[in-house]
Image (spheres, rainbow, N blue to C red):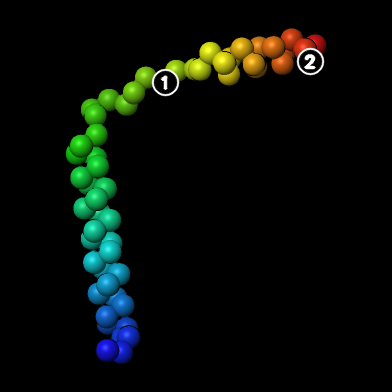
Amino acid sequence: MPDTKSGRERKGRNKRRQLENHLARRELDADDEPPEPYAEPTDAEFLAESDDAAR
């Protein structure tokens, strides 16, 4: 079956609809509030040590 412009356009619309449905499903399944941000102690210690060494 030959590749036609209308077939490519239809395929593109279907992919867009699938993506929109996927994103909507993810949004509905997500928690109401985002998780609290936290700093990893190893990163904070490393940054504090490098600041002291630079002075």
Q: Residue tagged by mark 1?
A: 37
Residue at 51% across, 17% down: 40
Residue at 28% across, 56% down: 19
Image spot of residue 20 (x, y percent):
25, 54
Whether residue 55 sits left or right of residue 5 in the image: it is right
Residue at 24% across, 34% down: 30
The disc labelled 1 sits on which kind of residue?
Answer: Pro
Image spot of residue 25 (x, y percent):
20, 45
Q: Hey, which quadrant is residue 29 in on the image?
A: top left
Image spot of residue 13 (x, y percent):
26, 68
User: Which disc number belongs to residue 50?
Assistant: none
Quarter holding the N terminus is bottom left
Ranked by sequence position, the earlier of labels 1 and 2 is 1
| Location of residue 3 with respect to 51 vertically, above or below | below
View extreme (bottom): residue: 2
Tally of marks:
2
Whether residue 51 sits left or right of residue 6 in the image: it is right
Circle 1 packing at 10 Å, graded few (<14), some (14-19), many (20+), is: few
| Location of residue 43 with respect to 12 vertically, above or below | above
- Does the residue at mark 1 contact the one at mark 2 (Cβ under 8 Å)? no
SS for dot 2? helix
| Location of residue 6 with respect to 18 vertically, above or below | below
The disc labelled 2 sits on which kind of residue?
Answer: Ala
Q: CA distance from mark 1 to mark 2?
A: 28 Å
Circle 2 packing at 10 Å, graded few (<14), some (14-19), many (20+), is: few
Residue at 72% across, 14% down: 51
SS for dot 1? loop
Quarter holding the C terminus is top right
Q: Residue tagged by mark 2?
A: 54
Q: Hey, which quadrant is residue 26 in on the image?
A: top left
| Location of residue 28 with respect to 12 vertically, above or below | above
